[in-house]
Amino acid sequence: MDIQATLEALTAINKYVVQVAEDAHLDHRAAYQLRLAVDEIATNVVSHGSSQIPHEVVFKIETDMDDEYLTVILEDTGQPYNPYQAEGQEDLHQPLEQRRFGGLGVYLALHSVDELKYERLGQWNRHTFIVKRECHDPQ
């Protein structure tokens, strides 16, 4: 699926992730966490990744699934954005009044899936979300 990176796109991406999680027979918790992780990264792209970009930012989303894993690949043409280098995560252990604003959503994205990979390919950010499929039989 290719879609313009707008707030409206977040709904379409959410529906897509819910459907692929269902197709993969993920349990409720794994499906929710995958949706949370993808939504957080996509929201950051829409909110921050298009500033100072002279072109329309676009998302591409696709999936791959085998007996063991569901993989969701979210690509965008926004500013380079490596969630492992996002600010605000380093002080999450501090008391609330001592923390900087931001970073919690990225922290949740990084810890909600079994693996999250980031790479910059030319003008594209690629975020790869990998979830282990615990249940293969929908019962």
Image (cartoon, grey):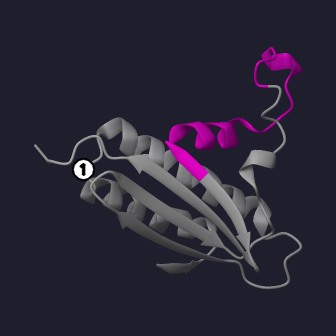
* Magenta span includes 122: no
- Residue shown at 85%/25% (left/top)? 99
Question: Is residue 14 visible from the viewing direction of this image?
Answer: no
Residues packed near mark 1 inside 10 Å, few (<14), some (14 to 19) or many (20 plus): some
- Residue shown at 25%/59% (left/top)? 23
Which residue is labeled 1 in the image? 25
Task: Identify the magenta region.
Answer: 92-116
Residue 113 in the image: x percent, y percent? 50, 43
Which quarter shows the C terminus? top left
Q: Is residue 124 left or right of residue 88?
A: left
* Amino acid type, mark 1: His
In which quadrant of the rendered view does residue 118 lie? bottom right
Would you place residue 52 above or below residue 17 in this image? below
Question: Is residue 86 visible from the viewing direction of this image?
Answer: yes
> 42 or 26, which lies in front?
26
Would you place residue 56 above or below residue 135 in this image? below
- Residue shown at 83%/26% (left/top)? 91
> 53 or 21, which lies in front?
21
